[in-house]
Amino acid sequence: MNQGAVNPFSLFFDLGTGLSKEKTSTKRYLADLKGMFADDQALDKLIEVYQEPVYEFYELDLPQTPSNLLFGTSIVYPGKVGNEYFMTKGHYHSLLETAEVYYCLQGQGYLLMENPEGDWAAEKLIPGQTVYVPPRYAHRSINTGTTPLITFFVFRADAGHNYGTIAEKGFRKLIVEENGAPVIVDNPKWKHSSS
Amino acid sequence: MNQGAVNPFSLFFDLGTGLSKEKTSTKRYLADLKGMFADDQALDKLIEVYQEPVYEFYELDLPQTPSNLLFGTSIVYPGKVGNEYFMTKGHYHSLLETAEVYYCLQGQGYLLMENPEGDWAAEKLIPGQTVYVPPRYAHRSINTGTTPLITFFVFRADAGHNYGTIAEKGFRKLIVEENGAPVIVDNPKWKHSSS
């Protein structure tokens, strides 16, 4: 075998819960999402009483080459900060020219995407819906339902994660609840970049 | 946008049937699998009475670049040719150094894999099980159950399909029914390659 060669293997991710007993998930809490929701005061208040993860996902340890693929599940729990739905931090790939595929297993929500050119899209997630995140698109999962939003994802193993750009600028759009239903609105905190 | 740039999109693949109403599947019939089962006579007899697809799958039309990913579902129907379970033709990727991920949605079976170095593996498929097909591995789905075996797959868009090597040589191993259960046996037809 070549150095760094990977053998066939399998991993179980429960279709109903998204969870794997074979791996430890990475969990993100409200405190990890400071500054990312529109309503900072609502976040500060909720942090005092809400100790559960906002979301969790699985990361694999495979050689970070263009030949390999990384995969796992992402589970975004239901909830809101003010009128804004629970969501993932969202990120660009460090290698901007790499794509990602999300297959929705449970729940409902949106995959919010935008690229540096100013294009954006919000694709609906329901069980069976597959969303293609093309190269150059930052992406964030948003749970607009009342049950966990569970997706199965795959991306190139050398893609890497760039969380910094979104942490600094935010996404152009937010998804918030109005009259009991999700609506897409402009993000008042969104920052133009000079880069 | 760059030439060849892809916009975000989504496609629905039913979790229960694997089918998409938005795309036309590619269907393979027994006649397409001539020479691939161990028992040619059993195949010839079954072809006369069995007109349904052995399997079907979806192919996307995205730019065949290393930046993009192709995805879809594969549905292998239950059945046997002699004592050998219904299966896909199986293939190498034309770009040998590319991987593929299979997430099992329904049914039960195996993903049979082998590489040119002589390594092989058979990973069990049950709902929730994800199988990693590493770079360099030919792969075939085999339905050992009584219901459709449905998987969701993702691979690099430039990987391409090399069906010829398997069509000529076969896989080293077969999965057949013995005493009502699947067993992995040597393929009597398997041909060594001088290449």
Image (cartoon, coloured by chain):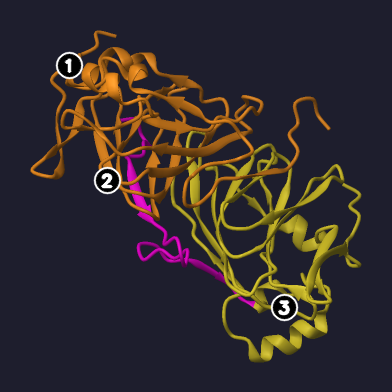
Chain colours: A orange, B yellow
Q: Which mark is residue A41?
A: 1
Q: Which residue is mark 3?
A: B80
Q: Which residue is mark 2?
A: A145
The kind of secondary structure element at disc 3 is strand
Circle 2: is it few (<14), some (14-19), or many (20+) Cα within 10 Å?
some
Q: Amino acid at mark 2?
A: Gly
Q: Amino acid at mark 1?
A: Gln
In the image, the segment drawn in magenta is: B1-29
Closer-to-camera residue (B107/A173): B107
Closer-to-camera residue (B89/A25): A25
Q: Indicate whether residue A35 is drawn in magenta.
A: no
Q: Are marks 2 and 3 on the same chain?
A: no
x and y percent of residue A66 in the render?
Answer: 60, 29
Label 3 near label 2: C-beta < 8 Å? Answer: no
Label 1 near label 3: C-beta < 8 Å? Answer: no
Q: Seen in the image, is B91 located left or right of residue A80?
A: right
Q: Chain of mark 3?
A: B
